[in-house]
Image (cartoon, rainbow, N blue to C red):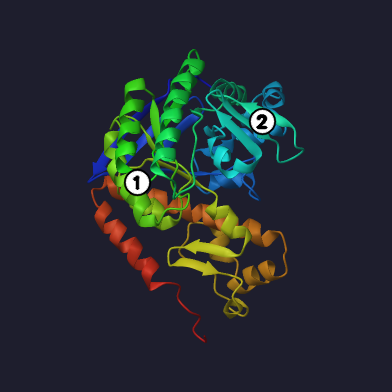
């Protein structure tokens, strides 16, 4: 594949909503984009070709988990992450910063970086900003994330400020470590600052001064109310360069994505489509549908006859209910596929509406469909 330079092209705006394209060494990503989460070099329960067929341009891999198993050096020796998992399209890898928070009982943190006790075998593992970049380079990620410290919320302002400033210093070190990376690859800085708008703006401005090809808003959807999260996104996004991609990390529900896109966010990732699929919850144009519910047991209708996803159009609700209730592995696989397809359908709708100058109408119609809810069976 020709090694194109990394770039972002803003194609259209409608209010704050944006539609564009991110160019990487492994292809173009249409934005707004939803990135299925492939933590351990796999989107759980979904074949790579199926992930692509749902409309995904890019997926996410996890630095922390892949450095433990099978190891970044091994993946590099096997040709890199794209070849290893048979995904020849763009890949973004997070830096391991989220695990700084989620595994707080298993780690020690200081200026130099983080020392983890592996959740697998208890071995001590060091992750510095430089090592985080080295691992992601070995994986051959198209988009590399800086190492940062993510805090659970609520937290004391002093702690939020300390973590934000540490993340800025780590961002500078990551940028130095990333210098000389091949064409088509990019390092994103991560805005921190918890639920404090002033700290968020300070972080954003400092990162812009350092200079990155793209910027992420991290440390949200970690305990704060949705209203607070969206307020932080709405106030932070305009402080980031209009000619660079904006990525909201780890968010979220379809409503989160729609509302954050209205604030000018270009990229998203979240485990919800596959995690909820494994537990019997499907996302549709009419909102969430719990296939564990007994009311679906004799319902011959498809889950969503208007879906672009064949599985949503063809399998009956009764069959999906049966698979989930009997713990057959096909059930979570089908619902994960259906959910990923719905998320991509939502992203495609946002892109098309923004380019047509009718985002507000699309947003209102989508919310109206969710609020009306699922249509009950005729004999219910």
In this orientation, which residue lies closer to the viewer: 229 or 344? 229
In this figure, what is the number of numbered marks?
2
Task: List the residue tagged with mark 2.
Answer: 67
Q: Secondary structure at mark 1?
A: helix
Tell me what residue is drawn at x 71 percent, y 41 percent: 119
Tell me what residue is drawn at x 63 percent, y 49 percent: 46
Residue 108 makes an appearance in the image: yes
In this orientation, which residue lies closer to the viewer: 302 or 213? 213
Work out whether mark 2 precedes mark 1 in sequence or the reverse, and give the earlier one. Answer: 2
Residue 302 drawn at (x, y percent): 54, 70
In this orientation, which residue lies closer to the viewer: 228 or 133? 228
Residue occupying the far right of the picture: 121
Residue 281 drawn at (x, y percent): 56, 64
Q: Looking at the image, is 243 positioned above or below residue 347?
A: above
Tell me what residue is drawn at x 26 percent, y 58 percent: 361
Tell me the distance, in whole angstroms, between the alpha carbons under discs 2 and 1.
35 Å
Residue 129 drawn at (x, y percent): 54, 24
Q: Residue 273's quadrant in the figure? A: bottom right
Sort mark 1 into few (<14), some (14-19) or many (20+) by Cα contacts within 10 Å: many
Residue 86 makes an appearance in the image: no
Q: Is residue 273 left or right of residue 246?
A: right
Residue occupying the far bottom of the picture: 379
Disc number for residue 351? 1
Tell me what residue is drawn at x 71 percent, y 21 percent: 77
Sort mark 2 into few (<14), some (14-19) or many (20+) by Cα contacts within 10 Å: many
């Amino acid at each position: 594949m020709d090694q194109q330079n990394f770039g972002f092209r803003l194609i259209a705006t409608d209010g704050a909503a944006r539609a564009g394209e991110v160019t990487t060494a492994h292809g173009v990503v249409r934005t707004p984009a939803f990135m299925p989460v492939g933590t351990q070099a796999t989107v759980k329960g979904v074949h790579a070709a199926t992930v692509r067929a749902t409309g995904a341009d890019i997926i996410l891999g996890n630095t922390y988990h892949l450095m433990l198993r099978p190891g970044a050096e091994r993946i590099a020796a096997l040709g890199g992450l794209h070849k290893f998992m048979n995904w020849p399209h763009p890949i973004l890898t997070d830096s391991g910063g989220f695990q700084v928070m989620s595994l707080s009982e298993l780690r020690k943190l200081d200026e130099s970086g983080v020392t983890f006790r592996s959740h697998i075998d208890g071995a001590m593992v060091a992750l510095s900003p430089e090592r985080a970049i080295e691992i992601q380079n070995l994986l051959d990620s198209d988009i590399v994330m800086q190492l940062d410290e993510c805090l659970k919320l609520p937290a004391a302002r002093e702690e939020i400020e300390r973590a934000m400033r540490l993340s800025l210093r780590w961002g500078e070190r990551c940028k130095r470590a990333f210098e000389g990376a091949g064409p088509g690859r990019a390092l994103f800085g991560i805005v921190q600052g918890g639920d404090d708008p002033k700290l968020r703006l300070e972080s954003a401005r400092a990162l812009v001064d350092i200079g990155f090809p793209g910027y992420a808003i991290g440390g949200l959807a970690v305990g704060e109310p949705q209203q607070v999260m969206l307020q932080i996104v709405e106030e932070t996004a305009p402080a980031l360069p209009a000619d660079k991609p904006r990525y909201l990390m780890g968010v979220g529900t379809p409503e989160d994505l729609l509302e954050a896109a209205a604030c000018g966010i270009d990229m998203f990732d979240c485990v919800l489509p596959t995690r909820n699929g494994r537990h019997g919850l499907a996302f549709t144009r009419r909102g969430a549908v719990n296939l564990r519910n007994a009311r679906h047991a004799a319902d011959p209708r498809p889950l969503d006859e208007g879906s672009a996803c064949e599985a949503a159009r063809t399998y009956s609700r009764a069959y999906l209910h049966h698979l989930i209730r009997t713990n057959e592995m096909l059930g979570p696989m089908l619902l994960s596929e259906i959910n990923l397809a719905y998320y991509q359908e939502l992203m495609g709708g946002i892109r098309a509406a923004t380019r047509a100058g009718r985002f507000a109408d699309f947003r209102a119609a989508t919310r109206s469909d969710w609020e009306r809810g699922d249509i009950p069976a005729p004999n219910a």
